[in-house]
Image (cartoon, coloured by chain):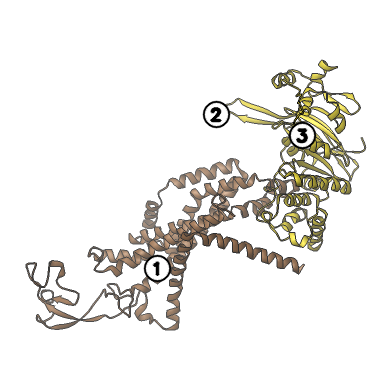
Amino acid sequence: MSNEKDIAKSIRRAALKKNWRLFRRSKLGMIGLYIVIFFFFLSILQPILFVTGVWNKGVYDPVVGYSEQFQEFLVVECPTEYPTEKYKNRSDCPGRTEVNVRTLYYSDAEVGDYIIQNLQPAPPSSEHILGTDSLGRDVFSQIMEGSQVAFVLGLLSATLGVGISTILGTIAAFFGGKIDAYLMRQSDLILMLPTLPLLFIISAFAELQVWHLAVVLGTIGGLGGSVITIKSQALQVKVKPFVDSARITGGSQMNILFSHVLPNVAPLALLFMVFSVTGAIASESVLSFLGLLNIDMSWGLMIYLAQVEGFIFSGMKFWWLILPAGLSVTFLTGGFYLVGRGLDEVFNPRLRDR
Amino acid sequence: MENTLIEVKNLEKYFEVSSGLFSRNKAIVKAVDGISFNIPFGSSLGLVGQSGCGKTTTARALSLLDPKTGGDINFYNTETSSMQSIDELEGEELKKFRRNIQMIFQDPYESLNPRWNIKDIILEPLNIHNIGDLKDREEAVYEILKTVGLTPPENYMPRYPHELSGGQRQRVSIARTLIMKPKFVVCDEPTSMLDVSIRISIMDLMLNLAKDLEVSYLYITHDLAVARYMCDRIAVMFNGKIVEIAETEDLLNNPIHPYTKRLISSIPIPDPSHKRETYEVNFQELDSLIADNPNSGEMIEVSSNHFVATHDVKGIL
């Protein structure tokens, strides 16, 4: 029988290889996969850097770290009328390494002197490759922390949501009748609810932490539209002759449900899972951007801080406070979406050619 | 009758079709309307007729897949050596009884779970009924694969259905139905989706297995040639009723009912110069004739073992 096991193993490997080949053929899917792997690498890199001692926790901690950034400044006096020889308009003075004498009311330095000041937020340097924020915290470390949060939240809420919708959708298709009618009306109702305003209300009453948000998002997603889609897929499986054949043989309802119907809706459920990660990460960013989430650090919170401290309106002068976090949200959600598209090509019988 | 395996009396299967959510009048579709036949041990009955005449509905009712709405199905119980109505069976008894009846489906592409390998597919009935230990079951699968001609079995057991050809899949379905050693197998056009070159080998396999394992078939088809090859007797169905039932050769050579005549006259003959004389039947007239006749379910014996529905015999005899 060992011979048979070997064949089974090689066949399973061949099937995996074939699916991998189909996935690789979709360029978008591969791009998405690289993006997701990149962010996953970022999120596991931070703890490694702390443990190995490459990064000092006091300096690089994304929440309580502090990095002194002293720099020499030239004291100048900004003119009252523009343009002058040195400055074209008002926003050019003081320059990046200059300080206006009129704002130095606590010092007796004079025009032409050099004074040393603590510069926060500091632009990117070799020490902090994405600079620091206004409190002297390393932005790159914050990005890493944010990607940990995004992965935990996205995967947790997606798993929960898809688990709920797969079980409910299959039950609705399989038993039909009143159970089906109830579940479908319920998901219509939840589909109708606007998710974000609902989350605002919830966060007004309860202090939302990341895993709370994951549970709420997962439940709303799991009871909503995906139940209907999973049900339609399960209905297709239910009328297949192999289900009849199991029934003739005497298989019980539960037996048929778990061994025939569920395995055949699983690929669709996986697809839903990947797509719902995108929604979860985006909702988290919106909520923490609005300051409604009780969370230490996340990408949305970084943009929120930059906004409340006024850096968001200074053009691209303080780009390292806004761009890295904004692009991270965009790329990771986009990456998961593209992976979903790639998986669609593997699992969707309409798009599949083999 | 001592040697009757299954006896069907006035089997009825009606479907209710509601015309709207709040409307009270429900239309009733009489898919199978009072058919009777019996099948002796080891003999097979062919069921022929046009599309939508209720062949598959009969099959599904006989295999206890859908509940019948009327009539009796009696089955020979080997334990008590007497006929037993399937209505009396419930729970565990029913599950045990299901071992006796199996069904082979038309579409070999859909009748095997695409996510299971061949071994698991054939093992499923044994697992459901908890027969033997794991080693016995694997040996049984090995043997049955050899029997249906999928050799060497260890090459097929780990494969998935999509890796096999249509004919091989249908062999797997046959193996799956026969592993329980059933007495009665309902075949719903098992060869109609296979290509012609494979068809005959599958039919030979089924005939040999029937002889070896003493299985009776109810063979549904609309190909009279297939029915002639496979069956001892043929029943012709029309609009939910059996209109004629006889020994195969008797029916083909000496059809009495106009619908049977029409059916036989429409068999193509592979001769370009042959001028076909089709027997024309006004189906509407026939339909109303059946509907108007209160005794249309009754059959009369015109010669030995040759029964014809009464509604039309008046015109002939």
**Is residue A317 shown left or right of residue A34?**
left
* C-alpha span from label 1 to label 3: 76 Å
Frontmost of labels 3 and 2 is 3
* Disc 3 residue type (three-letter): Pro
The tint of chain A in the picture is brown
* Disc 2 residue type (three-letter): Phe
The residue that appears at 27% across and 72% down in the rendered structure is: A134
The x and y percentages for residue B233 are: 85, 34
* Disc 1 residue type (three-letter): Gly
> Is residue B83 something one can see in this rendering?
yes
Q: Is residue B78 above or below residue A75?
A: above
Q: Is residue A254 above or below residue B313?
A: below
The x and y percentages for residue B92 are: 78, 48
* C-alpha span from label 2 to label 1: 56 Å
Q: Quadrant of the N terminus of chain B?
A: top right
Question: Which element type, helix, strand or loop, lies under badge 3?
Answer: loop
The residue that appears at 64% across and 46% down in the rendered structure is: A238
The answer to whether dots 3 and 2 both sit on one chain is: yes
Chain letter, disc 2 residue:
B
Q: Disc number at residue B22?
A: 2
The x and y percentages for residue A188 are: 48, 44
Frontmost of labels 1 and 3 is 3
The residue under label 1 is A146
The x and y percentages for residue B253 are: 85, 28
Residue B151 figure quarter: bottom right
* C-alpha span from label 3 to label 2: 55 Å
The tint of chain B in the picture is yellow
The answer to whether dots 1 and 3 both sit on one chain is: no
> Is residue B93 something one can see in this rendering?
no
Chain letter, disc 3 residue:
B
The residue that appears at 28% across and 66% down in the rendered structure is: A306
The residue under label 3 is B270
